């Protein structure tokens, strides 16, 4: 099946992302100063580039684990039912946990994941989202740290896909579908 024709317009440059990650890492380091029990949990697949850049800015002992929750499939609309497709490998009981998400949109995914992980007796759960679309929120949740607030646009790049493509773009861009007349 061929995809609809679309173009991508840059919204956030690679340079701006890198600068913001440096700031966020400073705040995270301050928050978790002195801990030797931090586990950074990336939500697959969209957060893989973000988590890679973020942990390399953290001057702290960290462990990394991944969890995959179902989301958009190959479309551009979120589904309210969140399923866990791949669970963590490690235990988080008694640990400081930092959940790393690419985008908070309706809020269903992040709130489901936080609720689930809270049942496992972590010492503390904090969250970070690279992008936030506050105008789309249906569940009341705000990440502890947010990279950028963005308008209600469908975005790709920096790990984030459209139908599995464009994750390798170094910047965040908006997808515009070309309507043929
Ligand atoms: P929520 O559960 O908050 O509605 O959706 C969160 C998930 O939807 C994100 O983890 C992300 O995977 C996906 N998502 C939300 N907005 C976008 C977007 O603009 N582009 C892409 N590719 N995925 C999005
Ligand atoms: Mg996601």
Image (spheres, rainbow, N blue to C red):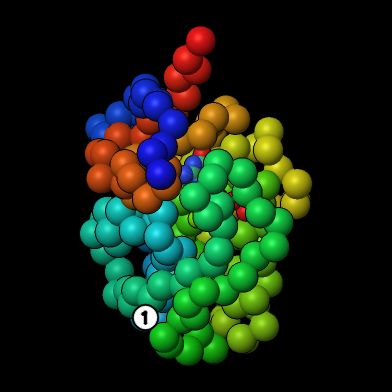
Where is mark 1, residue-wise?
Answer: 36
Number of disc labels: 1
- Nearer to me, 6 or 169: 6
Give the farthest residue toward the top: 181
**Vertical relation: 45 (above or below) 60:** above
Instruction: Give the vertical position of 160 relative to 123 (above or below).
Output: above
Residue 126 found in image quarter: bottom right
Residue 116, x across and y down, in percent:
64, 76
Identified at 37% across, 50% down, the residue is 164
At 34% across and 58% down in the image, what residue appears? Answer: 48
Q: Secondary structure at mark 1?
A: loop
Q: Is 86 above or below relative to 99? A: below
Seen from this angle, which residue lies furthest front? 1
Residue drawn at x 55%, y 41% is 76
Side of 169 where 23 appears, left or right: right
Asked whether mark 1 lies closer than 8 Å to ligand 2, one says no
Kindly indicate the quadrant of the structure image that contains residue 45: bottom left
Q: How far from the left and from the top, in percent, is residue 174?
A: 43, 28
In the rendered image, the quadrant that contains the N terminus is: top left
At which x and y percent is residue 157?
A: 34, 40
- How crowded pointer 1 is (Cα within 10 Å; few <14, some 14-19, many 20+) is rated as few
Q: Position of residue 132 (x, y in %)?
A: 56, 41
Question: Can I make out residue 97 in this image?
Answer: no
Q: Is residue 107 above or below residue 64?
A: above
Q: Nearer the viewer, residue 86 or 92?
A: 86
Which residue is at a point 29% across and 75% down the rendered structure image?
61
Can residue 85 be seen by looking at this rendering? yes
Q: Nearer the viewer, residue 103 or 155?
A: 155
Q: Is residue 170 left or right of residue 31?
A: left
């Amino acid at each position: 099946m061929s995809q609809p024709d679309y173009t991508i317009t840059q919204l956030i440059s690679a340079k701006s992302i890198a600068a913001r990650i440096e700031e966020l890492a400073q705040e995270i380091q301050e928050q978790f100063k002195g801990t030797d029990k931090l586990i950074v949990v990336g939500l697959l697949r969209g957060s893989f580039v973000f988590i890679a850049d973020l942990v390399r800015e953290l001057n702290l002992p960290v462990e990394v684990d991944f969890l995959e929750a179902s989301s958009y499939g190959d479309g551009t609309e979120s589904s309210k039912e969140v399923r866990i497709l791949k669970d963590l490998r490690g235990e988080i009981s008694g640990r400081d946990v930092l959940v790393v998400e690419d985008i908070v949109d309706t809020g269903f995914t992040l709130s489901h994941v936080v609720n689930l992980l809270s049942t496992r007796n972590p010492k503390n759960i904090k969250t970070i989202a690279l992008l936030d679309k506050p105008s789309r929120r249906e569940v009341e949740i705000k990440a502890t740290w947010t990279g950028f607030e963005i308008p209600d646009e469908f975005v790709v790049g920096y790990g984030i896909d459209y139908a599995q493509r464009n994750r390798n773009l170094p910047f965040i861009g908006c997808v515009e579908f070309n309507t043929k007349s």
